Amino acid sequence: MHRISKLAVLAVVGVVALTNVSWANAQSHYKLVKTIDLPGNGGHGDWVTFDPQTHTAWIVQSPDHNVVVIDADKLAIKAVIGGIEDGNGIAVGEKYAFVADATANKLVVIDKNSMKQIASVDTGGKKSDGVTIDTQSGNVFVANDESNTETVFEGEAPFKRIGNIALRPQPAKDGPDVNLYVPGLDRIYQPVDNVVDVIDPNSNQVVAVWDFNLKKAAKPMVYDSQARHLIIGSRDKKILIVDPDGTLISSIPFEGGDIDEISVDVAARKVFVGDKVGSAEVVDLDTKQVIDHLKTEKNSHTLSVDPATHRIFVYLDTSNKVGVFEPV
């Protein structure tokens, strides 16, 4: 009897050991391959975006009034563009990068060839935040937090302001976050407080407001072009999977919750979540589960992915570095 109990204990220990090995393996899908030091002193920075055309990562280094461009092949700084008072959202098009300056309430335009500022245009709103580009018309849309509006600009010089959209709800508690234009759907998706405004960029009108009964803020989103789903972040500790008609397909819970930016690798079927808890969650789009965590640092909240190499660029804004992770 004693022998059987001992064998049973050994069997349980073996199961636990195997479970731990499985969990360890689940945590090792990505490795940190480089940490890139940034200029300046750091602090609470903001948005990261990836430009597949030039194979560069663009980082809005707001405390040091810079935009830093990282060469994704060399894993080194390619350019530093200064003179931006309080950079917030950024979108990169074919010729230009567009940066929202939250304090100056300007849309700053950077030429991708010269890596220099070529324009700074008044947004007409307060606390400019998210930026997205309508790739069909070329127009640029800027969300303004405090005025709860979306300003529309022409995407070519002189970058004229051509429209202003009142967002819903009115009034808003916190206002809009970072917006997303989806070419295949020809719509702009704009989180405002705990709902999502759907904007027709042809009429510059809010044509729908999606309410998923979130108690906390809806956050920026990405588009899964393979499954044709919008993937919406939220502060409700869940990620929403939504059809283009606004139907909620599923929600994926995760342990963190204080998220800001999410990035999608459609080919790899992964979503990466910038979370201030000190780790970035990795979500499998097919199983709809959190499968991995990338160790970052507390308050790090923005990241982007290179769809060619599947590397993830995480802005460690407090320590003023960029952590580069790649699949093992």
Image (cartoon, helix red, strand yellow):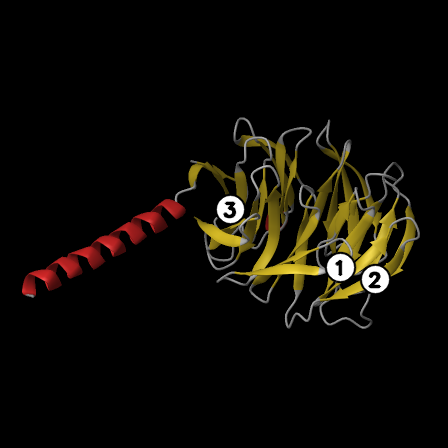
Looking at the rendered structure, the secondary structure element under dot 3 is: loop
What's under tag 1, amino acid-wise?
Answer: Gly
Q: Which mark is residue 320?
A: 3
Residue, x 85% and y 39% (percent of image)?
138
Q: CA distance from mark 2 to mark 1?
A: 9 Å
The foreground one among 101 and 11 is 11
**Left or right of 188, for residue 163:** right
- Mark 2: give few (<14), some (14-19) or many (20+) Cα within 10 Å: some
Asked whether the residues under the numbered discs 2 and 1 touch, taking CB atoms below 8 Å apart as contact, a structural biologist would say yes
Residue, x 62% and y 60% (percent of image)?
250
Above or below, 63 against 173 in this view is above
Q: CA distance from mark 2 to mark 3?
A: 39 Å
What's under tag 2, amino acid-wise?
Answer: Ala
**Left or right of 92, for residue 204:** right
Quadrant including the C terminus: top left
The mark nearer the N terminus, 3 or 1, is: 1
**Left or right of 96, for residue 299:** left
Identify the residue under disc 2.
Answer: 208
Identify the residue under disc 1.
Answer: 246
The foreground one among 325 and 223 is 223
Quadrant including the N terminus: bottom left
Q: Position of residue 297 (x, y in %)?
A: 45, 53
Looking at the rendered structure, the secondary structure element under dot 2 is: strand
Disc number lying in front (3 or 1): 1
